[in-house]
Image (tube, grey):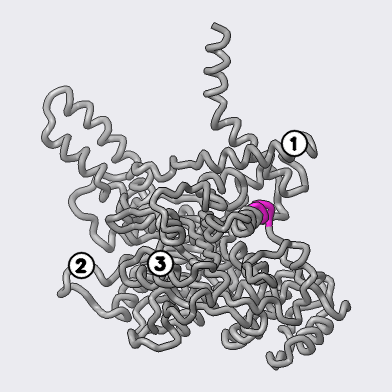
């Protein structure tokens, strides 16, 4: 076994493109516009890995300038020694996201061991005991053999490492790293000195790099002044903002990338070309094979509750003559889709039965893991509100009722296991939530029945849950809340497996299912969320493909080279998208 292994941390092609663009912005010789870079990438696109790459790269040179190393320099760093002691501040909305970032660092940087799949169990145990003696590592599970996959060996290692040890490993790797929540207070509401975001003048330019995760949250009234003060007191610091959804969901609907750029440069007219390193919208990412496309399972009775259906029904009731006949045709079509004619409000028990029928008919994995997004118990009339535990208990009962008649492939009732995470710290604090989340991730999705994690005002953004088979959408999302919709949908979008690159697999690889029990997709599609695409991204992609063709020829969609196959998929998407314009121009020239 090689005594000192180097970091084996390989970004995917599009992530490398993003980091190159960030480096180009930050390393500009013109200091007027070299401090801020923004990245809009959909959930599953690996924003956290891009951020970690910048954490590995940043350093202060002998002239006091903040610069970024190239990938070749990083690859020569010994993973058993200090990786980067540069002062870095990482800010996120929640402790769960910060915990996930630390796990990414441990799994994908510190323990990303070259040749792990070919190492014996004895070699692995010996290596970890030698390199990380403070872990008191007792050895990986007995069910792991020398021939087990790299993924299984990695999971077995991580199962032996506690959250406290993860934190210690990260501190050794990044001695200058500080991780903070935007709120700056503990879950119980009591402020603590070291939990606040540093804004005092005496730490001016303390941090060389500040990362704003889920950057759309910067604009919250509660902490926006803290972030502004931090930026004002950091006139040399590099600022990296990352998010899947840059727009605020409040009544202001501000693009927070633009707002942060204004804070950094004190410039009201600054253009995105100056600060945007990459913008990839979710449909672009799905079409290009960057992320998976989850299967949306419609729940027809949700249509009965929709504004669209109620408007048609009201028009029918007041219409007369021919108009009434035409509207009835539309109404009959809706009833046919629903499979029934609604008579007043659907009773909860009846609805649970219909949801159960939908699950039995469409559920792919009867042993899978699912996140259930339920309505908040913080809204509604005060007299109707109940405690979090009782609220969860009621929902657990409903969900169990819905799965009552769902049977496995052998005709046996499926076993259902339900747990929950909550923002109510009086019931469950961040550490307890993290443990439940880790236990959920560790559960098998091949045996043991259905595992459901109920989210009560949690997991709406930022936290990627490994190995889930889908989401159950019980929470109604308004048509003007596209950010929340994309964030919740994002829990079921994952990065495309780089080992699978055929054209058919690009389209069909996703195993995740979204059961939309609240009609959210209908509401958002009418709001045209699905039709928004980025011309900037198209132009960048055309440039990349042109460079590839110049050096390598036309990309083959069935190539075993991941980048080539992705370029072929992207080229087909771009052709389909702009073909009509080309034909129109060609026809006009003939005339």
Residue indicated by mark 1? 549
CB-based contact (under 8 Å), mark 3 and mark 2: no
Q: x and y percent of residue 328 in the render?
A: 22, 32
- The reply to whether the magenta stretch includes residue 15 is yes
- Residue visible at 32% across and 39% down in the picture: 336
Residue density around tag 3, few if under 14, some if 14–19, many if 20 or more, within 10 Å: some
Other-residue count near label 2 (Cα within 10 Å), few / some / many at <14 / 14–19 / ≥20? few
* Distance Cα–Cα, label 3 vs label 2: 29 Å
Q: Nearer the viewer, residue 591 or 446?
A: 591
Q: Are marks 3 and 1 in contact (CB under 8 Å)?
A: no
Q: Which mark is residue 377?
A: none
Q: Is residue 252 left or right of residue 122?
A: left
| Image disc number at residue 380 | 2
Give the percent coordinates (x, y) of residue 587.
55, 12
Question: Is the residue 386 above or below the residue 341 in the image?
Answer: below
Q: Is residue 393 left or right of residue 122?
A: left
Question: What residue is at 43 percent from the left and 59 percent from the top?
Answer: 260
Residue 161 picture location, percent across and down: 64, 85
Residue at the image position 34 percent from the left and 66 percent from the top: 220
Per the image, the residue denoted by label 3 is 404
Work out whether 284 lies above or below 514.
above
144 or 10: which is nearer to us?
Answer: 10
The residue under the point 38% across, 73% down is 226
* Residue farthest to the front, as pictured: 63
Q: How far apart are labels 3 and 1 at the CA level? A: 56 Å
The magenta stretch is 12-17
Cα–Cα gap, marks 2 and 1 = 58 Å
Q: Quadrant of residue 591?
A: top right
Q: Nearer the viewer, residue 96 or 433?
A: 96
């Amino acid at each position: 076994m090689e005594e000192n292994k180097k970091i084996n941390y390989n970004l995917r092609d599009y992530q490398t493109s993003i980091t190159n663009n960030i480096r180009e912005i930050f390393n500009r010789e013109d200091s007027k516009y070299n401090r801020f870079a923004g990245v809009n990438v959909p959930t599953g696109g690996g924003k956290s890995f891009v951020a970690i790459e910048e954490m590995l790269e940043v350093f202060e040179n002998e002239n006091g300038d903040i610069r970024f190393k190239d990938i070749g320099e990083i690859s020569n760093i010994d993973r058993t020694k200090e990786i980067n002691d540069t002062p870095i501040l990482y800010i996120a909305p929640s402790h769960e996201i910060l915990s996930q970032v630390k796990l990414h660092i441990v799994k994908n940087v510190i323990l990303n061991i070259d040749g792990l799949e070919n190492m014996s169990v004895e070699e692995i145990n010996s290596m970890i005991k030698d390199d990380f003696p403070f872990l008191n590592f007792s050895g990986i599970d007995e069910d792991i053999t020398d021939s087990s996959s790299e993924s299984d060996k990695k999971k077995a290692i991580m199962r032996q490492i506690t959250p406290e040890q993860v934190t210690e490993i990260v501190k050794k790797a990044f001695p200058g790293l500080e991780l903070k929540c935007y709120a700056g207070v503990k879950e119980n509401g009591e402020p603590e000195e070291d939990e606040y975001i540093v804004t005092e003048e005496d730490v001016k330019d303390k941090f060389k790099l500040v990362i704003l995760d889920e950057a759309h949250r910067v604009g919250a009234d509660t902490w926006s002044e803290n972030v502004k003060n931090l930026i004002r007191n950091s006139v040399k610091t590099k600022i990296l903002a990352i998010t899947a959804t840059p727009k605020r969901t409040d009544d202001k609907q501000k693009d927070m990338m633009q707002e942060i750029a204004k804070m950094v440069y004190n410039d009201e007219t600054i253009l995105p070309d100056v600060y945007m390193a990459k913008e990839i919208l979710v449909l672009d990412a799905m079409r290009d094979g960057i992320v998976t496309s989850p299967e949306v399972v419609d729940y027809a009775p949700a249509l009965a509750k929709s504004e669209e259906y109620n408007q048609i029904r009201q028009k029918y009731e007041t219409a007369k003559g021919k108009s009434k006949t035409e509207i009835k045709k539309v109404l009959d079509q809706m009833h046919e889709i629903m499979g029934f004619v609604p008579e007043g409000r659907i009773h909860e028990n009846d609805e649970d039965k219909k949801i159960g029928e939908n699950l039995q008919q469409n559920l792919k994995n009867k042993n899978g893991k699912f996140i259930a997004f339920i309505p908040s118990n913080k809204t509604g009339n005060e007299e109707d509100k109940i405690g979090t535990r009782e609220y969860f208990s009621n929902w657990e009962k409903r969900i169990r009722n819905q799965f009552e008649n769902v049977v496995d492939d052998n005709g046996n009732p499926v076993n259902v296991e339900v747990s929950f995470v909550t923002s109510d710290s009086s019931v469950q604090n961040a550490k307890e939530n993290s443990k439940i989340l880790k236990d959920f991730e560790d559960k098998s999705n091949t045996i043991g029945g259905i595992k459901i994690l109920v989210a009560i005002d949690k997991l709406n953004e930022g936290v990627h849950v490994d190995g889930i088979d889908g989401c159950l959408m019980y929470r109604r999302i308004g048509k003007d809340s596209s950010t929340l919709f994309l964030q919740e949908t994002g829990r079921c979008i994952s990065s495309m497996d780089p080992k699978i690159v055929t054209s058919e697999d690009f389209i069909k690889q996703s195993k995740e299912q979204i059961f939309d029990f609240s009609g959210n997709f209908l509401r958002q599609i009418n709001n045209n969320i699905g039709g928004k695409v980025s011309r900037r991204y198209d132009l960048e992609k055309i440039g990349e493909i042109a460079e590839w063709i110049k050096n390598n020829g036309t990309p083959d969609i069935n190539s075993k080279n991941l980048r080539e196959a992705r370029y072929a998929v992207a080229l087909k998407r771009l052709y389909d998208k702009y073909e009509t314009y080309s034909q129109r121009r060609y026809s006009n020239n003939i005339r």
